[in-house]
Amino acid sequence: MNKKLLFIPLFAFLALVAVFTTQLVRNSEGDDPTKLESVLVGKHVPEFRLEDLAEPGKLYDQSIFKGEPLLLNVWATWCPTCYAEHHYLNELAGDGVKIIGLNYKDQRDKAVTWLNDLGNPYLISLFDGNGMLGLDLGVYGAPETFLIDANGVIRYRHVGDVNARNWKETLQPMYQQLVEEAK
């Protein structure tokens, strides 16, 4: 038997160790392993026609995302993290941040009650009961928030709740830059 063949398992093992070590070092240097990139960043919001949450029959399409920068917040009443972020979204809306809501795979009556009881931070509330726009956006669950420029182009995708920390550190500087670009 060739003695060189005995070293093949050792080399395979060392290659696996190198791959795992590289991943561990990369993640410990600030990469966020929970960050989900979106293939839509840099592309226009997908085409859609959805009803208003509170006014069935009133339809919107992707043209609502043109004219000024805004956030598209994907939320649902079944989502505990959405409940946790809702107060902060009301604060942002009170400070002039433009937000459109996408009620995702939810029951319309529960969602309307939620907004009536907790406040409505949204300029427009879209009802995506079957989740098709969410699917087109690549939504994994709620909450997710997309930063959209004045031309309707998705610039950033944030997975998880919007809170004071990630707003100030990440989202607000990007939002402010888009506002300046739109002037």
Image: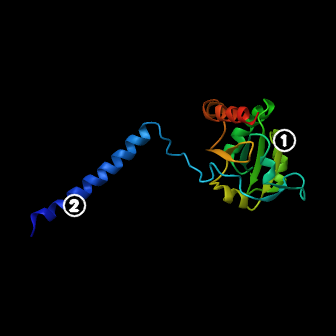
Residue 174 sits above or below residue 58 on the image: above
Residue 147 sits above or below residue 106 on the image: above
Residue drawn at x 81%, y 58% as measured from the top left: 50
- Across and down, in percent, residue 119 comes to 83, 38
Q: 69 and 13: which one is in front?
A: 69
Visible residue check, residue 131: no
- Across and down, in percent, residue 121 comes to 80, 39
- The quarter holding residue 170 reads top right
Residue to which mark 1 is pinned:
117
Q: Is residue 11 left or right of residue 167?
A: left
- Across and down, in percent, residue 88 comes to 72, 34
Q: Badge 2, how many Cα within 10 Å: few under 14, some, many 20+?
A: few
- Across and down, in percent, residue 95 comes to 78, 29
Q: Give the amino acid type for the residue marked by disc 1 in the picture.
A: Asp
- The quarter holding residue 89 reads top right
Residue to which mark 2 is pinned:
9
Q: Give the amino acid type for the residue marked by disc 2 in the picture.
A: Pro
Q: Is residue 27 left or right of residue 104?
A: left
Say which of marks 2 and 1 sits in front: 2
**Quick one: label 2 or label 1, which is nearer the N terminus?**
2
Marks 2 and 1, how far apart at CA = 63 Å
Residue 9 sits above or below residue 102 on the image: below
